[in-house]
Image (cartoon, helix red, strand yellow):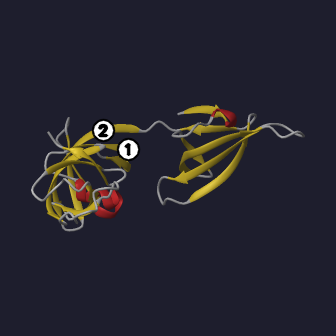
């Protein structure tokens, strides 16, 4: 762990503050006409997700936390738990579905994910930015609706609804952004 000054905090830094682990979401350096400059930081708690706005002066020091990033392979779903395997030690890790959130629907057998660990405890997970999925159901194109850039709803093989261009039909494979849950393009 390294000590850094309050004015060195940047978005994405994980710090220890008030006995908890916080990630800096936004930072803004403020130089008022009177008094010393400070760093206005929006923090998000990594454990429970609460947010906090805090001012850090350059004289204040905080503990910067280094998170361990490990690659895991998704194995299977078991009730409310998702089971992953460490690709180096072959140990299994169980995470609750609500820990992964809505994006759990994008998990596929053997998919590689990165788990953020702090003292061997998982505190975050990142999935690949894009996945290829098949459309199981798509609304037909309404004649005359193609003049404007209109999108139609479609249901993917994992049950997620996305908006796709009118030329995409059922049975086609598309690339989907797992962060925004949006259509990107047709899969090759």
SS for dot 1: strand
Q: Is residue 21 left or right of residue 4?
A: left
Q: In the picture, which quadrant includes the C terminus?
A: top left
* Badge 2 density bin: few <14, some 14–19, many ≥20, Cα 10 Å: some
Percent coordinates x, y for residue 88 in the rendering: 20, 35
* Badge 1 density bin: few <14, some 14–19, many ≥20, Cα 10 Å: some
Q: Quadrant of residue 119?
A: top left
Q: Is residue 175 left or right of residue 23?
A: left
Determine contact: label 1, label 2, CB under 8 Å: yes
Task: Tell me which label, 1 or 2, sits earlier in the chain.
Answer: 2
- Residue 117: assigned label: 1
Mark 2 highlights which residue? 70
User: Which residue is depicted at the point 63% across and 39% down?
Assistant: 62
User: Which residue is depicted at the point 34% across and 60% down?
Assistant: 101
Which sits in the foreground, 118 or 148? Answer: 148
Number of numbered tags placed on the structure image: 2
SS for dot 2: strand
Which sits in the foreground, 119 or 142? Answer: 142
User: Which residue is depicted at the point 26% across and 54% down?
Assistant: 165
Which sits in the foreground, 28 or 163? Answer: 163
Q: Quadrant of residue 58?
A: top right
Percent coordinates x, y for residue 182 in the rendering: 32, 53
Percent coordinates x, y for residue 75 in the rendering: 15, 51
Percent coordinates x, y for residue 131 in the rendering: 22, 46
Q: Is residue 153 above or below residue 29?
A: below
Q: Residue furthest left?
A: 171
Spatial CA distance of label 1 from label 2 is: 7 Å
Which sits in the foreground, 66 or 110? Answer: 110
């Amino acid at each position: 762990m390294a000590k850094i000054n309050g004015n060195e905090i940047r978005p994405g830094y994980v710090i220890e503050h008030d006995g908890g682990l916080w990630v800096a979401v936004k930072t803004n350096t403020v130089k008022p006409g009177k008094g010393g400059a400070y760093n206005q930081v929006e923090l998000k708690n990594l454990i429970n997700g609460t947010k906090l706005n805090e001012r850090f002066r350059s004289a204040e020091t905080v503990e910067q936390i280094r998170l361990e990033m490990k690659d895991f392979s998704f194995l299977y779903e078991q009730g409310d738990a998702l089971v992953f395997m460490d690709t180096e030690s072959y140990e299994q890790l169980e995470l609750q579905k609500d820990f992964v959130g809505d994006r759990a629907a994008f998990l596929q057998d053997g998919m590689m994910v990165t788990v953020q660990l702090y003292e061997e405890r998982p505190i975050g997970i990142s999935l690949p930015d894009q996945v290829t999925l098949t459309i199981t159901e798509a609304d037909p194109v309404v004649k005359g609706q193609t003049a404007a850039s209109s999108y139609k709803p479609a249901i993917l093989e994992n049950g997620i609804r996305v908006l796709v261009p009118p030329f995409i039909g059922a049975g086609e494979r598309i690339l989907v952004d797992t962060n925004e849950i949006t259509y990107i393009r047709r899969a090759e």
